Amino acid sequence: SFPLQELAAGERANVEALGDIAISLPIVKREASAAGLTFKSHLRRMLAHGLLHLLGYDHGTPDEARVMEQAERRLLGSSR
């Protein structure tokens, strides 16, 4: 993820665009296969993960990782 501005988790952006998300499709395919996931489900997770980074979430500490994982679950509508 490449944000246009740095945000704290949950902080609202003052721009119409948050930034860019780059996803390597071959890597998503390889990771999905290794984890026993479908390509589509893993791609959705990677997109959600990138979006959360643009929204200021991070996973550098265990607490940050827990908060980001909870946000990812809410975004994807899953209990995973």
Image (spheres, rainbow, N blue to C red):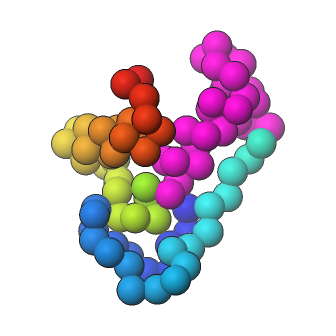
As drawn, the residue found furthest toward the left would be 63
Residue 53 rendering spot, x and y as whole percentages:
44, 58
Identify whether 78 is placed above or below 48: above
Left or right, residue 28 beside residue 19:
right
> Magenta residues: mostly which secondary structure?
helix
- Highlighted magenta segment, given as a residue range: 26-51
Q: Residue sitting at 30 percent across and 38 percent down?
A: 70
Single out the residue that lies furthest toward the top.
Answer: 36
**Residue 69 falls in which quadrant of the image?**
top left
Q: Residue at x 35, y 64 (%)?
A: 56
Image point (43%, 45%), residue name: 75
Image location (x, y in percent) of residue 58: 35, 53
Image quadrant in which the C terminus is located: top left
The quadrant holding residue 36 is top right
Q: Can you tell which quarter of the image residue 57 is in?
A: bottom left
Q: Is residue 46 magenta?
A: yes
In the image, residue 24 lies in the stretch drawn in magenta: no
54 vs 60, left or right, is right
Instruction: Using the image, determine if residue 4 lies above or below residue 52.
Output: below
Count of numbered marks = 0
| Residue 61 seen by the camera | no
State left or right for residue 12 relative to residue 78. left
Q: Position of residue 52 (x, y in %)?
A: 43, 55
Q: Is residue 58 above or below residue 37?
A: below
Residue 70 visible, this angle: yes
Q: Residue furthest right?
A: 26
Residue drawn at x 34%, y 45% as measured from the top left: 71
| Residue with the most extreme front position | 77
The quarter in which the N terminus is drawn is bottom right
51 shown above or below 73: below
